[in-house]
Image (tube, helix red, strand yellow):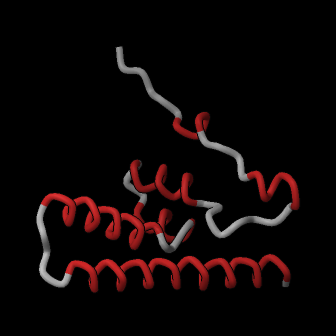
Amino acid sequence: MLVSLDTREFMLPCLNKQLFGVECPGCGVQRSLDLLLHGEFLAAFKMYPAIYFILILLLFLISNTFFKIKYGYQIKLFLMLLTGITIVVSYIVKMNNFIN
């Protein structure tokens, strides 16, 4: 017997959104990851554009733990900056669309 697990039942609510009615910069990560796990890659990007940079950064950090990569520090800084900028820009765009 095949049991289907609905991962949306286990998602945590955004405390910022519940208290203040405004989404936080991390809103959408869980739903985006769920979409990614279900093979909906474009929908995952539309839900949370930084999801791919976060995954690349995590993969790099894990691999750099086991294998010393040349220029690893610089690559890590670049990926962190790219991820942070993507999160901030997508949040500003989301809030701009929310206000207008």
Left or right of residue 96: residue 78: left
State the residue at coordinates (45%, 67%): 51
Q: Up-down: is 57 above or below 85?
A: above
With 86 as the anchor, is 59 left or right in this view?
Answer: left
Figure quadrant of the N terminus: top left
Return the x and y of residue 71 as percentages of the image width and height.
18, 84
**The quarter of the displayed image where residue 68 is located:** bottom left
- In the picture as drawn, the residue positioned furthest to the top comes out as 1
Q: Residue at x 37, y 54 (%)?
A: 39
The residue under the point 80% across, 76% down is: 98
Quarter placement of the C terminus: bottom right
Q: Residue 9 at what x, y percent from top left?
A: 61, 34
Above or below 46: residue 36 = above
Depth order, front residue of 11/60: 60
Q: Give whichever of 7, 66 is nearer the camera.
A: 66
The percent position of residue 87, horizontal first and vertical second, equals 56, 77
Is 79 located above or below residue 2 in the figure? below
The furthest residue to the right: 20
Residue 96 position by quadrant:
bottom right
Q: Residue at x 54, y 68 (%)?
A: 48
Query: Count the marks: how many?
Result: 0
**Relative to residue 54, is residue 63 drawn left or right?**
left
* The image quarter in which residue 46 lies: bottom right
Q: Position of residue 26 (x, y in %)?
A: 62, 64
Relative to 65, 5 lies left or right:
right
